Image (cartoon, coloured by chain):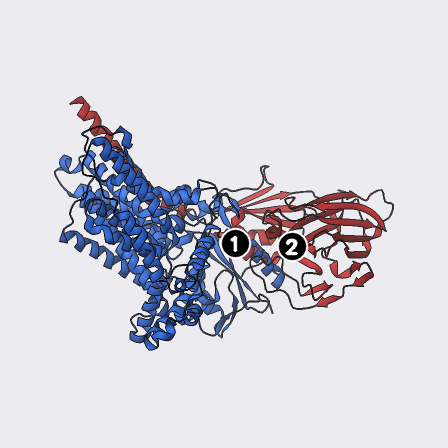
Amino acid sequence: MTNARALKGRDHLIGAGLCVAYVLLLVGTATDLGMSRDESFYVHAAKSYAGWVSQLFSDPALAFGRESIDRAWAYNWEHPAWMKLSFAWSWLAQKHLGLFPNESLAFRFPGMLTAGLLLWLIYAWGASVMRRQGALFAALAFALMPRVFYLSHLACFDIPIAFFVTLTAYTYWRALADRRWVPLVGLAFGLALATKHNSWILPGIFLIHFLWIRRDEARAGRIERSSVMWLPSMLVVGPLILVGTWPWLWHDTWARLLAYGRFHLSHVHYTYEYLGVSYFEPPLPVSVPFVMTSFTVSLTVLALALFGLYHRREGLRLPWRTKLGDATGLRTEVLWLGCMLAPMLAIALPTSPIFGGTKHWITAYPFLALFAGWGLVAAVERAELDAWTGLRWPSWAFAVLCLLPGAAETAHSHPFGLSHYTPVAGGVPGAADLGMNRQFWGFTTGSLAEWISSRLPDGGSVWICDTTNGAWAMMQRDGLIPSNVRATPSMSDADLVLVHHEAHFNEVDYQAWVAYGSVQPVFVLRYDGVPIISVYENPD
Amino acid sequence: MPEAGRKLSLAAWVWVLIAGLAVFELVARPLIHAAIPSDESWEAASAFVRARYQPTDRLVAAPSWADPIVRSHLGDLLSLRAAAPSDLAGIDRVWEISIRGATTRDEPPALEEDFDGVRVRMWPVSTDEVLYDFVENVENAEVELVGTDGSNACPWTSARPSGGGLGHGPMTPTERFVCDPRRPWLWVGATVLQDLELQPRRCIWQHPAGTDPVRVTFPDAPLGERLVVRGGIDYNSERRRVHGPVTLRVWIDGRLAAELVHHDGDGWSGIDLDTSELGFDRAEVRFETSATDPTARLFCWSASSQRGRSD
């Protein structure tokens, strides 16, 4: 069982270094990524909220009125405000100070920042309980997960919620031993609530963990018990922050909160291809999050995580096996395991709405990475690499070797992050053979921008399939797509028709055949030889 | 000490295993990449097929996900009927263009060539001859919307096609019979359906209007030994299996020859009518669709007169 070790300035220097380096890497590679479907909605929302923020400064009385709030905040009411407000602030900064080279980066930067902070946090938590080498490995292993790398670029909520969930878990864990952290649990949980609904499961995880350690303490005969003060902090401060940062809830609070809850508990089902079947209604196979994780995360990291779990199995000992006088601790292993498994199990439940994408359980991956860090430390220590050789570099070389597959896969995945599969699936072609989801969000249109520009040198129109008009407009403002190449809602009016290849999008392929009387695409964008987008050209 | 030695070897084994996994991953990526056929391979294979292709040939891609690549090279050879076959009739040879060792047939081919990762195989097949394809001749039909107060003719119209999009169903063709402009789905024409298995089917869209039939009449259609009728409902409407059935009645020279009742879940399916004993080569053939509840009944059918090969 592991208790917290105090962090030193050097630890935060390393964490900050990881954060800055990752954010710079994300900024440097963001222009390769066309805006995705969901980003375009959040950008639209952020602009609307930015207008309200501006009004708040110019005419606060009017801004607080219901009419102003409803007008600005009705759009995208189904998601809390925190990250969209961050996007709005960043965009306002861009408007007034011109901080970023293009507009999309202004919206994306807050998400990138949470990605960097998450690395810092993973390192800090890891360094609190294991050798720094393991902590550093955990942070880098997370950073070098291909889908994490893709999502870290976006003006979306997936990486931010992974950060705030991990932050809440960390503050809770600290608060168990140090009451000064108690208010921070509520603050972190509030920000998690205000980011995305993945946060709803946190009190349940913490409660199980807490009861586990309290039972432990009772059986061991400890007089001093862990404090439960984290719970009221979460339950009081958390909702206050949710409501306080989300003006939409300032009127009709209960009705709107209930509508928000209902929206996600009875969410529409996405059609999702998995092992050759397009699922469109529950139940999605229980195996989805586990198989998708094994197909998209480096096998070496997964093996290290399993080894780390095995190595730390004593920390997972059931509480009723604790005997009087036994040492007790924070049961970090139980907490991490809960935080890792709960999001995956939530998606695996037969009653859960069909989402499918790894992003929906991505909050599990920081903990997966932390277990991998433990696994690395255990492998190095048990093999006695340092003692055997008398040198330190072999253990570092081993760590680098274990990170290389993730690094290579991530480098190769860009800018096709959501289409990428690891060698366990046989790579991208192997996953296509298996009938795995090829993509979603229409994000791959960005990879066609150059081709489209050269095909339509004098401008024209494009039927953009799964890409939204907002995403297209952003690509135009970013300079990826010429302004005289417009999106059109009619295939027959378009000069070019894009078909994003997903199994259930075959319908669109067939529509293009009839519209143009031809089944021959003029271009097929491929990733590792697998069709990603077919382009048809209007013969007229 | 033996215990310590045993533990050390176990730990070393774990270390080697994990290092081995890392090496496997690092080696696997370039191997996967090396197995991807080049554009030159695709072009060479396509040129080989193109030089030998005949209009009665069929092209298939293996694995099926490679189909867009095959069509990008050879799609100009394919009619909509060839790309979206309603059945296997009218085919003399099957060309399979495959990668990654995938195959669609077990029997040995009559011809096989490999183009550095792209394999071309050909099989002669002997399927029934198509005498008359009702889908490709739909403009020769007469279409009417039957009601309690008689029937209204649906004129052949050249009109704006639908916009297209996910969940929008089959594309409305430019030329079609329009039965009721107030009900934009009430048209008849040739399109391509996405069936329950997500496969393309060249067919005649004939959405039922209710219990009164939508009627399509081919006044003088050639008949053969069989009239092969297939039908299906758009994937998005059929997959949920919540709507009522669609009835397709086939009349030959005023006599009810067959009734196909299509339930959600049936997928692309139909009947083969024996017409060899009717005693005439041509006849008026009528197709009527109806449904108790026409909601979301995006029904599409195909039919062809066929006869066995004489050779």
> Is B219 on the left or on the right of A3, as rendered?
right
Q: Amino acid at mark 2?
A: Ala
- Tell me which corner region of the image, top left, top right, bottom left or bottom right, holds residue A388: top left
Is residue A116 among the parts visible in the rendering?
Answer: yes
**Quarter of the figure with the C terminus of chain B:** top right
> Is B79 on the left or on the right of A279, as rendered?
right
Instruction: Please tell me the colour of chain A.
Output: blue
Residue at (13% x, 36% y) in the render: A387
Residue at (65% x, 68% y) in the render: B160
Numbered mark located on residue A426 in the image:
none
Q: Amino acid at mark 1?
A: Ile
Marks 1 and 2: which is nearer the front? 2
Is residue A300 among the parts visible in the rendering?
Answer: no
Q: In the rendered image of this protein, does residue A256 appear above or below residue B266?
A: below
Give the residue furthest to the bottom: A58
Numbered mark located on residue B296 in the image:
2
**Quarter of the figure with the N terminus of chain B:** top left
Label 1: which residue? B69
Q: In the rendered image of this protein, does residue B22 appear above or below residue A319?
A: below
Residue A153, percent across and down? 34, 59
Instruction: Please tell me the colour of chain B.
Output: red
Residue at (18% x, 22% y) in the render: B2
Q: Answer with mark 1 or mark 2, whichever residue precedes in sequence.
A: 1
Q: Chain of mark 1?
A: B
Dot 1 alpha-carbon crowd within 10 angstroms: few under 14, some 14 to 19, many 20 or more: many
Rounded to the nearest whole Å, what is the CA distance between mark 1 and mark 2?
A: 33 Å
Residue B205, percent across and down? 69, 56
Which one is nearer the viewer's eye here, A260 or A36?
A: A260
